[in-house]
Image: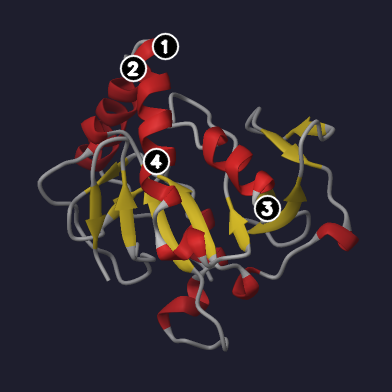
Amino acid sequence: MELPNNSTPAKNQLRTTLRQRRRNLTPHQQQQASMGLCRQLSLLPEFVYGKRIAAYIPNDGEIDPQPLLELAWRLGKEIYLPILHPFAKGRLLFMAHYPNQVMARNRFGIPEPLCDHSAYCPVWTLDMVLTPLVGFDEYGNRMGMGGGFYDRTFAFLRNNSRPRKPRMVGVAHECQKVERLPYEQWDIMMNRIVTGSRQYSAG
């Protein structure tokens, strides 16, 4: 799916401002937010009853989900991380993630698992997808980094073309919340948004 270039000076400025907010958090604030996020997420039905959970490696000040991953492994759950699709431009694949895994950096400098067909998880079989946000509002609208990777990868959720629907859970720092974000027709809405201190149910 080709997404229109909807970047505007105002949207780009907001994205820059929100990214700076999360980068300005101290290591202690980041750690506290990460632990709070884990407490909140660990109580969600999507986590309690889910088996396959997609997460991410934090970058650029993103809130760190690592404590939840440690808990998930102890509970016998499967964790998957996104990698840049080697053939389909602008899309993601999800590969199995486990402790002490050998990783490689993608073109954005973000660590990701090595591409391995045997470790691949079809996105429509995931139970919960933790989606890192740049900005959000309480209605479930989200702002990402602007590449459209999650929107393309999970486009099937808009027309229910697969038998299963992973629950999309956006995660961010509370300081990344804004009053209202514009909604575009190609945007994938979040079912919930969770921060280190609050939870917003959107659908």
Disc 1 to disc 2: CB gap under 8 Å: yes
Residue 97: horizontal and vertical position, in percent?
A: 74, 46
The CA span between labels 4 and 3 is: 20 Å
For residue 29, the mark is 2
Q: Is residue 130 left or right of residue 176?
A: right
Neighbourhood count class around disc 1 (C-alpha, 10 Å): few under 14, some 14–19, many 20 upward: few
Which quarter of the picture shows residue 35?
top left
The first of marks 3 and 2 along the sequence is: 2
Name above or below for residue 149 compared with residue 153: above
Name above or below for residue 175 compared with residue 146: above
The first of marks 1 and 4 along the sequence is: 1
Which quarter of the picture shows residue 13?
top left
Residue 168: horizontal and vertical position, in percent?
A: 43, 62
Q: Amino acid at mark 4?
A: Arg
Q: Is residue 74 left or right of residue 118?
A: left
Residue on which the image places disc 3: 80
